[in-house]
Amino acid sequence: MLLLENKVIIVTGATSGIGAAAAVEAARQGAKVVAASRRADRGEEVVARIRAEGGEALFVRTDVTKDDEIEALVASALRAYGRLDGAFNNAGIPGPVGTLEQISADDYRALLAANLDSIFVSMKHEIRAMKETGGGSIVNCSSILGTVGGPSFSPYVTAKHGVLGLTKAAAIDYAASGIRVNAVQPGPVSTEIWGHVKNSDPIYQAIIAGTVMGRAASSEEVARPVVFLLSDWASYITGTSLLVDGGYTIR
Ligand SMILES: NC(=O)c1ccc[n+]([C@@H]2O[C@H](COP(=O)([O-])OP(=O)(O)OC[C@H]3O[C@@H](n4cnc5c(N)ncnc54)[C@H](OP(=O)(O)O)[C@@H]3O)[C@@H](O)[C@H]2O)c1
């Protein structure tokens, strides 16, 4: 028995990095995957990879900062597969770097729109769909910066702390509807989100040095715990967050 056999799962931010890996790993575990993001060419590549392995997936072009596009994404999942069992709300951007005084209020708001408000709106539509079939499982993407602060990242830190708050609040409100809501908190993962920083950058290297394992994670090393939280193996887990951080936050 596969972990997500016949479950319909939405993955946002599925065109690269952690989200692409989660879409592939979920399909390997039997899920019908609805992959969402803005770059259609990259999304179709992920879908092709899943289909080449014998899995089932479709791509729905979605900008998670647009409420109507999120609503349309959930509607597409229902139209294609008739139900929604799970969602990994993973889309995110790195946001402005600098001290609070150096960051404009507009840039702050844009970061929150992409990394936090999008999760509120996504859960709203996903939960409505999941209630129709008696429940489901949602995993929201936070970060180690949802637990600790970090220099020059105040909007990102704010959003990722907020993701944990939304996760707990939704877990309480929807437990009676059979919906579990959890978060994942990755440590450093070598993905495109670091593109503006480059792997040799001292900020990135300092974060890696802060892990006790002394290395970044692969996207798959985050994706697999996400699949677990989406699955029925995590049936008594709700309102919590799983730190997948190589020990970054333990000291
Ligand atoms: N990498 C790390 O070290 C790390 C650590 C902790 C947490 N995280 C979190 O992990 C998540 C995934 O990031 P990643 O590291 O895998 O980076 P990534 O490769 O840059 O992936 C980000 C994904 O989000 C999508 N996205 C961004 N803005 C979007 C929007 N407005 N609408 C729809 N999709 C959007 C991107 O796709 P499109 O451009 O095609 O839309 C892309 O698929 C993020 O929430 C990030 O904050 C990453």
Image (tube, rainbow, N blue to C red):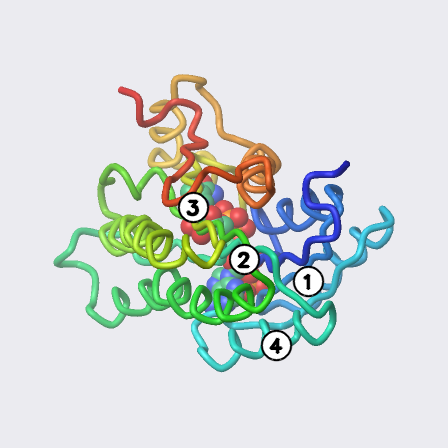
**Upstream in sequence: badge 3 or badge 2:** 2
State how far apart marks 4 and 2 are (Cα).
17 Å
Instruction: Locate the N terminus by quadrant.
Output: top right
Q: CA distance from mark 1 to mark 4?
A: 18 Å
Reading the image, the residue beneath label 1 is 43
The answer to whether mark 1 is within 8 Å of ligand 1 is yes
Q: Residue at x 70, y 66 (%)?
A: 59
Q: Circle 4 is placed at which residue position?
A: 75
Mark pair 1, 2: CA separation: 27 Å
Q: Are marks 3 and 2 in contact (CB under 8 Å)?
A: no
User: Which of the two marks, 4 or 2, is nearer to us in this view?
Assistant: 2
The crowd level at tag 2 (other Cα within 10 Å; few <14, some 14-19, many 20+) is: many
Three-letter code, disc 1: Gly
- Which residue shows up at 52% across the image and 77% down it? 71
Q: Amino acid at mark 2?
A: Gly
Report whether residue 66 is seen: yes
Q: Nearer the viewer, residue 46 or 70?
A: 70
From the Cβ of disc 4, is ligand 1 less than 8 Å away?
A: no
The kind of secondary structure element at disc 4 is helix
